[in-house]
Amino acid sequence: MDYLRQQKISIHRLALEHADIYAYKNKDGIANWDITVPDTVQSASSPAGDAMNISELDIRQISIKHATVTMDDRDTRIFANLWDTNLTLKANMKKGHSMLAVDFRNKNLLFWQDGQLLANRIATHLRTDLELNTARHSLLLHDAMIDINGTKLGVKGTVRRDTAAQALDVDLQYSRSIISPWQMPRFASDSNRYNKGSLLNRNEPLLCLLSMMLF
């Protein structure tokens, strides 16, 4: 009824366990998880009015437990495997603007770009509220918590995609309040290269994968 009256799809609860998930994006940037139809695309065999047009996707709860995720992005030449992946997601997604609450963790992440292995044996946990502006190609993190192999960081800031340069520009601030004293020297040296720069490097594989999915 929501779709007939408001072109809205509501998902109240979706649960997957021990799933094998393959996320693919071709060289033209078209992803196999994108269920919306671009405004400029019309089928020769059917009138434009027959195309499924979704104005809002309301997700009350998606739960994924113990999944294996393969991400194959031919557009940015990124390949990644994530083992024992767990995700809880709530979201309200509209054209141009979306809000998401994400709790994600996995036991091992393997990350390749341009045939080079950039990250391996990385256990991650990300908990955050996200604000996505597709018109500006920007992703805003609200008081995120990132745990990488037991090192916890509080994070807030913005990730933007530069479509011309095919890169992601990162402006993030990291909180020291949840870092143990013996981790301070390591954080001080890392923070200089985390605050600005391209996301497509070995320092930010988790946020890179998240941005790849959302953009």
Image (cartoon, rainbow, N blue to C red):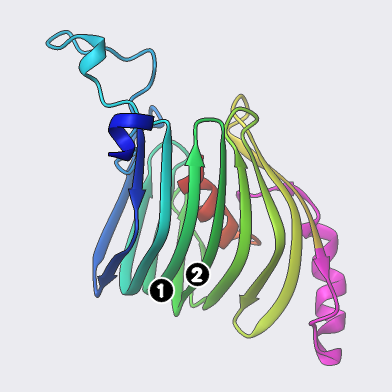
Task: Identify the image quadrant of residue 126.
Answer: bottom right
36 part of magenta stretch: no
Q: Residue at x 44, y 80 (%)?
A: 107
- Decide which of tag 1 and tag 2 comes sooner along the chain: 1
Tell me which segment is drawn in magenta: 174-202
Disc 1 element: strand
- As helix, strand or loop, the secondary structure at mark 2 comes to strand
- Which residue position holds label 1? 86
Magenta stretch holds residue 177: yes
The amino acid type, in three-letter code, at marker 1 is Asn
**Gap in Å between the C-alphas at discs 1 and 2?**
6 Å
In this picture, is 164 found above or below 21? above
Residue at numbered disc 2: 104
Q: Front-most of 70 and 125?
A: 125
The number of numbered discs placed on residues in the rendered structure image is 2
User: Is residue 30 something that shows in the picture?
Assistant: no
Task: Find residue 139 and report its horizontal and vertical position in percent.
Answer: 64, 45
Q: Is residue 191 left or right of residue 3?
A: right
Viewer-nearest residue: 146 or 40: 40
State the residue at coordinates (34%, 35%): 26
